[in-house]
Amino acid sequence: MKFNKKSLAILLALGLAGCANNAETENNNKREVETKEEVNNNDQSEKPEEKEEQIVEDKNQAHYDVNLSMLKGPTSAGAINMVDWSKNDDDPKFSFNESVEGAPDAVIPQLVSGESDMAIIPPNLAATVYNKTEGKIKVLAINNLGVLYLVENADLNINSIEDLVNSGEAIYTSAKGATPDLAINEVIKDAGFNESDVDIEYLAEASEVAQKMIAGEAKVALLPEPMVTNVLMKSENAKVALDINELYEKETGNPLISAVLVARSDYLEDIDVPLLLETYKKSIEEANSNVDATAALLDKYDIMPEVVAKKALPKLALTYIDGEQMQTMIKNHLEYLYQSNPQLVGGSLPEDDFYYTK
């Protein structure tokens, strides 16, 4: 085949153009690859720990509303300062919407339904809620140890459980299945007697039991502080017969735990838990160190009368225990109750995810 000069020129031009297009395509592809690599490198530059730090920073700058269920009596004394701080601080991290109930049973449906984010309740009820919700709550801290005493309102000379059984007197207490009921039955059993050997009369609230003692309508009562102090102040004949906390620990090897702070697991995912616990610890420390101011707040929030609170606060066994020590103490307490009657803890012992130990 023969090509003239004109044809060769045209072919040469087309060839050069094709080369140019191929070169441009290669350059474009190269730039695209470089751009993708740059994007990928930028994505990889944000390490997991940096993302975690960002989440922590976001939480530190956040504000949290907390629906908190509390009980009248000693278990709420440690929380009352932080509740009041949240209402008077110009920029509180936590705003507490408190609900004050007369008996622990009223708190359970609030936690189960999600109406409450957090609550202060006896540890066995916390285990019960854990089982009812299939593990959807966690225990954060212990806030009260033993505050239970047997009070007599007559010259019965009760110095032991045997004396109590032999007296034949009915024991008045509150809320079947709550901490006082569990404690007295364990102490009676460990002393070699049966529940049927004593007559226990249950009233709805500890305040009702106290009123019966003050009115002289009951001779023996099992009461927590501050109700014990209230009875001793208003009844000349009343006196403390037995320290149930001491007997319980002696017989079981475990300290009596009156109350713990619990929260819904899904709620904890959205808040700064370490800051919450730090605030709670400070609130308990304030209650122990500033009795007069705390007593005034307990009266203000209808937890207990100020005059009673001033005398009772040093006796409320207010404490703050979290982490592994908390887990060990509550586990031992619940295991002992479970061996006695599985239904006392809701039928089964909680798994390790019940305990917040971070």
Image (tube, grey):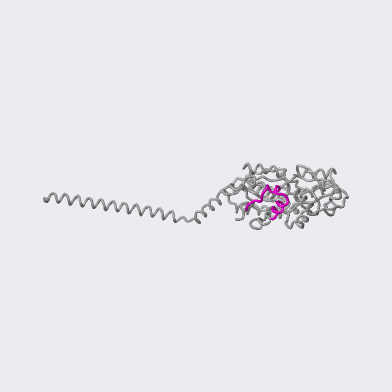
Number of marks in the rendered image: 0
Residue at left offset 49%, top offset 55%: 48
Where residue 174 sits, quadrant-wise, is top right
In this orientation, does residue 71 appear? yes
Q: Is residue 337 magenta?
A: yes
Q: Position of residue 343 (x, y in %)?
A: 70, 47
* Quarter of the image that includes the C terminus: bottom right
332 with respect to 220 (left or right): left
78 with respect to 65 (left or right): right
Q: Position of residue 160 (x, y in %)?
A: 83, 54
- Residue that protrudes farthest toward the right in the picture: 155
In this orientation, does residue 76 appear? no
Q: Is residue 86 magenta?
A: no
156 with respect to 139 (left or right): right
Q: Position of residue 40 (x, y in %)?
A: 41, 54
Nearest the viewer among 46 and 138 is 138
Nearest the viewer among 309 and 176 is 176
Magenta stretch in the rendered image: 332-351
Looking at the image, residue 246 lies above or below residue 65:
below
Residue at left offset 87%, top offset 50%: 156
Nearest the viewer among 162 and 227 is 162
Q: Position of residue 136 (x, y in %)?
A: 61, 47
Task: Decide whether the magenta segment is chiefly helix, strand or loop.
Answer: helix
